[in-house]
Image (cartoon, rainbow, N blue to C red):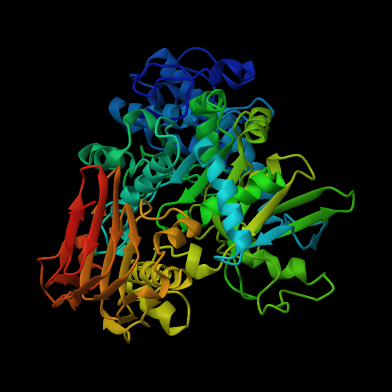
Amino acid sequence: MAAAGRRGRGTAGSACTVPLLIFYATASAYCTGRSAVFAAGHGRREQRASELAASADSLVDGLCGSEVRVVQWLASQQMGQAHLLDGWEHAGVEDKRRLIAQVLELDSSYPEDASGRRGLEAYVAHAKALLAESAANKNPFDGYSVELPVGERQEIGSEAHRADERLGLHVIQDAVFVLVAGGLGERLGFGGIKVALPTETLTEATFLETYAMALRAMQEGGDANRQVPLVIMTSEDTHELTQSLLEKNDFFGLSAEQLHLLKQANVPALETNDAAFALSKDDRFQIQTKPHGHGDVHTLLYQSGLLPRFASEGRKYIVFFQDTNVLAFKAIPAALGVSERLGLEMNSLTVPRSPGEAAGAICKLVQASGEELVINVEYNQLDALLQATEVGGDVADESGYSPYPGNVNTLILSLKPYMAALQATGGSMPEFVNPKYANAERSVFKKPTRLECMMQDFPKLLRSGAPVGFTDFERWFSFSPVKNAIEEAVSAHAKGVYAASPGAGEEAVYAANARLLRLAGAAVAPSEPPREFLGLPLALKPAIALSPRFALTVEELFSRVPGGAAVAISSRSTLVLDGAVELHSLELDGALVIHAGAGVRVRVRDCKVINAGWEFRPIEEGACAAAEAIAIRGYVVSRIETVEISEDTPGDYELIDGGVLRKI
């Protein structure tokens, strides 16, 4: 497993390392000797500069020459960070060195921009420009008109949909998969990383394990010798935890060589419109930092050197997906097929979106010059843009939904134009700033802000008119994010909105699997009435877990159910299928679990399974037997009675009446 971060210019661990940035700066920004005169910014910073000049010796007492030059650089007019040195005349040298070391680390992690600036010099320059635009309340979409984007709307299970799946499977092993996994589960009431949460409680397979299983299914169903790369963007909070999760679980069946971890660095928090860095409230020798946004994934990929390697391996596409939307992998094969069929340089997976819904939408923006940009527009900017269209706002079309589909941040990019666009910018991404102002003059922040970048803004780097589109899938099939703790989930449910809790995500998985089996012709009974767990109503039965190894596509799922209506599943049943299992004739009223290892094929024929089954039972208040990842759902699985089949010896088998497995 390869691990990488941004390539830097200095070594933050050495107290006497000079950032190379210093040598590219203008000579006037620096002085030599311990009695240097510090130049600072305007206003109160000019006053602070005079104070610094008078007390320069005490400010840098105990520091070596290179450290002194870092201090001079921070206080320069170019950087405008003289306030960081407040109280330094009375501070210990080790405290000073802590802040200098952090500055060097932050400087090394920020990429070079198109103007050749890099590190904190570039960050401050970008921040000043963007904060000035924000203070002036400048609209980033001034001069654009809105048109309908070009895209494909998929009818799940149709011949056209399955044809796109087949086309996608032809190139799926030529794709690189990139997981944006920088988040902790604190918002969900979970102390670990989000990808360590179970997608459902029948198998307790984590999100990361399920994604690894999908890649294994691609390899098992295609060229077993062609590995599908998985790149994971981590954060300072999640990197070690992600690496540990992989290593403890033997990489979930993947090889270490096909895994690549890229660690995202934070950026300084900003407390004023002139881009002053904010110090920690508890430690004046520590700069507050915040995440730079998931757009960093593009920068990290460029800096890692992986892209030329992937190109040399014949990779054609890069697929970006989010950490807790497990249903995305049902949609990705067909979306890849659409990209291949239409020659798209970027393809955004979307879902139908209601007018006014708080979700970004894919739009085609056109300037008076004729330049076009197909891109996600955030919901708080969308309606104002659409007011100028013929329909006069965000209104429904004949489908009942907005013609501008909802972005779910699963993206497919063609590798060659992707590499070329990043090469042109040195890997840097367009940024924005979104301060919350405390006054009408927009001059005071309620709390520190920072520059951010978004992965879905990549079309800004592509040429005007580049083939950029979307592939739209119904929500039940493709979108089940897990992002809310139980309190927010209950509130969302009361408003008629998807609850997005771990339990709601599990419910969505079971419902999607049941619906797909019905599309295949199986007689799956309607769901049992919802039951409340921690105040959230959930319809969890029938509970059906179908691994990616059972069916990676809808067409493959159809082929796994040749029996059609001869497959009957009651509403109280639990069904878990993993691997090459075919359902010819089955009557299930209880719990059935079948695992077929690599090279194993199991046909279920003339099989009746009736038993006490499994139940979802509430966790009693104060009970501590359930692990935290399960307990936050408010229920546990009680496995009362099961027919369980697990076979790893390659060959053909038949499961017959009573749950008896025999080799054919």
Q: Is residue 541 above or below residue 112?
A: below
Q: Is residue 177 above or below residue 566?
A: above
Q: Is residue 23 visible?
A: yes
Residue 285 lies left or right of residue 651; in this view the side is right
Return the residue nearer the eye: 662 or 650: 662
Residue 485 locus on image (x, y percent):
33, 68
Q: Residue at x 45, y 39 (%)?
A: 222
Residue 227 locus on image (x, y percent):
42, 33
Q: Look at the image and tell me in which quarter the N terminus lies.
A: top left
Can you tell which quarter of the image residue 517 is in? bottom left
Return the residue nearer the eye: 186 or 639: 639
Residue 353 locus on image (x, y percent):
61, 71
Q: Is residue 510 above or below residue 76?
A: below
Return the residue nearer the eye: 316 or 10: 316
Q: Is residue 454 visible?
A: no
Residue farthest along the front direction in this orientation = 664
Q: Residue at x 61, y 56 (%)?
A: 443
Q: Residue at x 85, y 73 (%)?
A: 390
Return the residue nearer the eye: 255 or 29: 255
Q: Residue at x 35, y 82 (%)?
A: 527
Residue 607 lies left or right of residue 428; in this view the side is left
